[in-house]
Amino acid sequence: MSQHLRLGVNIDHVATIRNARGGVHPDPVRAAHLAVRAGADGITAHLREDRRHISDDDIERLVSGVPAPINLEMAPTEEMLALALRHRPHAVCIVPERREERTTEGGIDAVAHYDRLAPIVRRLVEADIAVALFVEARPLQVKAAHMLGARAVELHTGAYCAADGENKRRVELKHIVDAADLAVSLGLDCHAGHGLSYETVGPIAAIHPIVELNIGHFLIGEAIFTGLEVSIARMRAVMDAWRMPTSASPLDAPPADPSPPDPAPADPAPMAAPEPSAS
Ligand code: PXP
């Protein structure tokens, strides 16, 4: 089983900041190049129906110019399918989308939407694009993704990250461990993501059937304080520290210190007020 856990860096929120002013800065494609330099194995971007962050032009520039696999997150619509077939990213992750949501709030229901998903997955697979379905960590969802012909499932880690208290978090972690085992037993690649931070990533990185994590919001937020390369390098280090060469379940693992290996530099003191001028 693969020891290397791939890190896909989601650069959506660089575009969120750019779009706040409607200009070209900061450029998510520049962030993607930096992310690759800092150790990202791939770049993930979600082209939303309302184009609230990533634009069509960003996708074009990512696919044509960034020296790493591009993972396009998209809703299962004809418009997005046509764009995926035109740009031909390395991979597509099919996600649910609601206009009023702030972020992708849950996995796609691959059972309820089976008939709608089937032709979209088929056409992407025929175009040799690696298809993942972003699903909740539940057996029926994983089985439906398998029956649909997806190459991978991406397990939604949002409930695990948001769980209130150790017991609830363990329950969510167990769902992810079980779903990852099931996915691999069915021949699917298993990915995971949503809401991961330095604090929550460790036990997920320790699940060996999972071979890829997609992480965005935390890394971009942290980059405000440390710079993007440092925020990504630290995430890489925490993932590697937890990716122990053992088949032990993360549920049995001792609670290793999930903090980043090297302490974050202290925040600089606030700027002193200028001395009143003598003149
Ligand atoms: N994976 C998928 C399928 C997502 O939709 C998102 C959010 O765009 C992520 C991973 C990354 O989540 P976050 O930004 O919370 O790290």
Image (cartoon, helix red, strand yellow):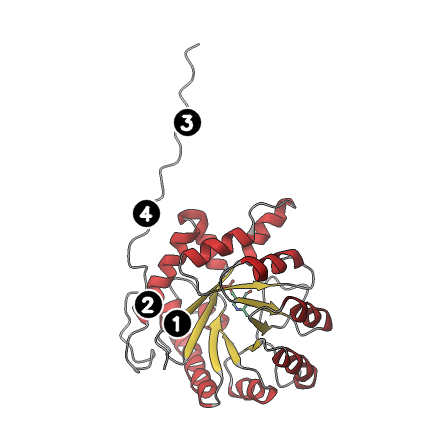
The residue positioned 45% from the left and 57% from the top of the image is 35
Instruction: Residue 92: give its label.
Output: none
Residue hosting label 3: 273
Q: Earlier in the sequence, mark 4 or mark 1?
A: 1
Viewer-nearest of discs 2 and 3? 2
Residue hosting label 1: 5
Q: Are marks 3 and 4 in contact (CB under 8 Å)?
A: no
Viewer-nearest of discs 1 and 3? 1
Q: Are marks 2 and 1 in contact (CB under 8 Å)?
A: yes
- The amino acid marked with disc number 3 is Ala
Q: Position of residue 143 (x, y in %)?
A: 54, 89
Residue hosting label 2: 240
Viewer-nearest of discs 4 and 1? 1
Left or right: residue 78 versus residue 141 is right
Mark 2 to mark 3: distance in Å? 43 Å
Q: Earlier in the sequence, mark 2 or mark 3?
A: 2
Q: Position of residue 20 (x, y in %)?
A: 62, 47
Left or right: residue 250 versus residue 58 is left
- The amino acid marked with disc number 4 is Pro
Viewer-nearest of discs 3 and 4? 4
Q: Secondary structure at mark 2?
A: helix
Q: Secondary structure at mark 1?
A: loop
The residue positioned 41% from the left and 27% from the top of the image is 273
Q: Earlier in the sequence, mark 1 or mark 3?
A: 1
Ligand 1 neighbours mark 1 (CB distance < 8 Å): no
Residue hosting label 4: 265
